Amino acid sequence: MRSFRIGSLFGIPIKLDLTFLLVLPLFAYLIGTQIEEVAGILNDGLAAGIDIGAVSGGTTPLILGLAAAVGLFVGVVLHELGHSLTAQRYGFPIDSITLWLFGGIAAFSEMPEDWRQELNIAVAGPIVSVLVGVGSYALFVVTPESLSGARFVLGYLAVLNVALAFFNMLPAFPMDGGRVLRALLARNQPYAKATQQAASVGKLFAVLMGLFGLFSVNIILIGVAFFVYIAASSEAQQVTMKAAFQDVTVGDIMTPASDLHLVDPETTVAELIRRMFTERHTGYPVVDADAFEGERLIGLVTLTDAREVEPVEREAYTVEDVMTTDLQTISPDSDAMTAIERMRDHDIGRLLVVDDDDLVGLISRTDVMTAFDIVQQSGAVAPAGQPRAAD
């Protein structure tokens, strides 16, 4: 998500995603267009005494809609703070809280695997939402009936925050209720297995929400369902991979240097592409053979680098002209998950494995996925030194 920081609370950066700037006026508009119906419901359910004529004339609906939308997202921030402060209490740092299209996200640096900790963190958000709803209702009660606009906003926030707390407690992983479900499942079975089971339930709920949203023509609910389904699948895969790669190092799954295809910096881009086609590789370490220093790693060249040169100019350009010299490296003793996260964070397909400035191998996404398949099927990685495919 593309976001920018607007401040911080309790040392936690608060960010706005660009999608939030689209959804806030949309929410304001939707609330404003339904103000008469909602005011009627509040009058019937809470004896609000709202003068519908006073809140439905001129630009008042849009102003009250904007106030209610802003109040709603303030409640979302407080909800995420509930999660975040509870997580910090257990020693888990929080990178940021971001408001975006579907509400808020607290970015955890690390997810707890102790079921009690996860249970407490998960329920903290809905508890805060209920407290925000209760607080809004208390303000609603003491607000004079002559202030119909203020009573509308406070009554709306009181009902909606409590409703959102209950909605978040649906067992639709990775929503709060789904995390509660995983915590309870993890009491007597492995964390990864509990995650897979909770994710399966979450995806089922996502399908049901999507169908309900489709038949009721609720675009927001369809969007939430889509997000839940994708997020459940993604987190389940990540947790499963982390469990599979426990105690597995980069050295266990990398392609060793002896099996690597290297390229000279003076090789033309045209020759490089021919080699990529025949050898079926898309990335090569670039090594400069020095008579006194031996082979020296100076860069990495990929198919993406080569494609930046126009076909008619590829004989004139060399690998040295297009290679990447800002190398992302990792040591062979690092754990495999560190390599996976680094490739993901830098959006790259491979890392050079370096030990004391010497190139000892290369780890690619292909290596990772091949090892993951082997670990899942046999419970062990391939023996050290066995050739592996390089991407």
Image: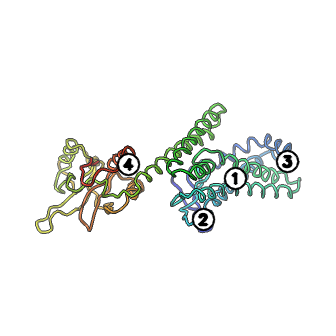
Q: Earlier in the sequence, mark 3 or mark 2?
A: 2
Pointer 4: what residue? 379
Q: Earlier in the sequence, mark 1 or mark 3?
A: 3
User: Amino acid type of disc 1?
Assistant: Leu
Please indicate whether residue 307 sits to the left or right of residue 9 in the image. Answer: left
Q: Which SS class for mark 1?
A: helix
Q: Earlier in the sequence, mark 4 or mark 1?
A: 1
Taking the spot 78% from the left edge, 58% from the top edge, the residue there is 135
Taking the spot 22% from the left edge, 62% from the top edge, the residue there is 297
Q: Earlier in the sequence, mark 4 or mark 3?
A: 3
Q: Earlier in the sequence, mark 2 or mark 1?
A: 2
CA distance separating discs 4 and 1: 48 Å
Q: Residues within 10 Å of mark 4 (few under 14, many from 20)?
A: few
Please indicate whether residue 260 sits to the left or right of residue 147 in the image. Answer: left
Pointer 3: what residue? 46
User: Amino acid type of disc 3?
Assistant: Leu
| Mark closer to the observer (2, 4) | 4
CA distance separating discs 3 and 2: 35 Å
Pointer 1: what residue? 72
Pointer 2: what residue? 7
User: Amino acid type of disc 2?
Assistant: Gly
